Amino acid sequence: MKVALLSESPADEAALRVLVEAALAEPVVLVQPGLRARGWPNVAQVLPAILRHLHFNTDADGLAVVVDADDSVMHTAEHEAPGYFHPQCRLCQLRSVFRKTQKRFPRPHGRDRVLRAVGLAVPAIEAWYLCGVDPQVTELAWREGQARGVPPYTRRELKWRVYGTDRPSLVYEIQQALASVRRQRGDLRRLEADFPNGFGGMARELRDWQEDARNKETPPVSALETSPPSPP
Ligand SMILES: [Zn+2]
């Protein structure tokens, strides 16, 4: 599959590629998104231009986007209700940018829309890197902490646990990010269980891509029918 990635930093992107390939169960060919983002809200700001670029100038099958939740509203199962949109949830916001932007694209030449996969790392992508290492770091722990008004850990602490510093060099950050996600790529179930909405939602969307690809491979029933015998 041809896939473009968008996240908050080159290190996040390196990890995202491994996770996307693990969820799709196949290597991907990377398509340049045309623009890079630097943190939130820049990701949401550049997303429409990236979608336009991918739709009109590339043959990308899909775009995977991951952002950190920081202290914003967590995406929960309630947000998945049809038509529901939480204006303070970054995942809901990004999905809405996809919908609004792609609605305006003409499809005259049969170009399919660029498929969507959006992830929300709660509270930051380092939480995903700690999966399987630190059982206290989960979406549930963060949600309960938010409800109590006492976060179970800070983003800075997560960075310390992953990198041994809260200011890693980019090279070291990429190295640690890759080591963490490569540990998990053989089996994403733990990551999906501990981060069911922010990671699980993205993994489900990625599996839908596979479904989409399979449907394209199977010709429609009408094409399978043999033409009626010609009259004698
Ligand atoms: Zn949401």
Image (tube, rainbow, N blue to C red):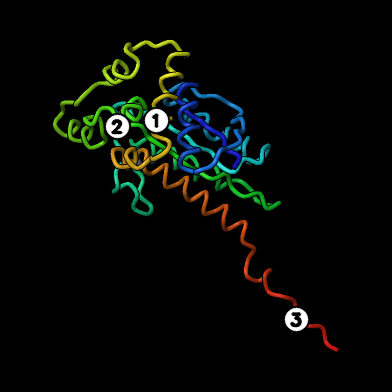
* First reached walking from the N terminus: tag 1 or tag 2: 2
Which amino acid type is marked by label 1? Arg
Q: Secondary structure at mark 3?
A: loop
Tell me the residue that label 2 is attached to: 132
- Name the side, left or right, on which 45 lies relative to 85: right
Image quadrant assignment for residue 55: top right
Q: CA distance from mark 3 to mark 2?
A: 59 Å
Q: Quadrant of the C terminus?
A: bottom right
**Residue annotated with mark 3:** 228
Tell me if mark 3 has few (under 14), some (14-19) or many (20+) residues whose alpha carbon lies within 10 angstroms of its own. few
| Disc marking residue 183 | 1
Label 3 vs label 2, nearer the camera: 2
Camera-side residue: 5 or 188? 188
Position of residue 226 measured from the top left corner of the image (x, y, whole percent): 72, 75
Q: Are marks 1 and 3 in contact (CB under 8 Å)?
A: no
Q: Amino acid at mark 3?
A: Pro
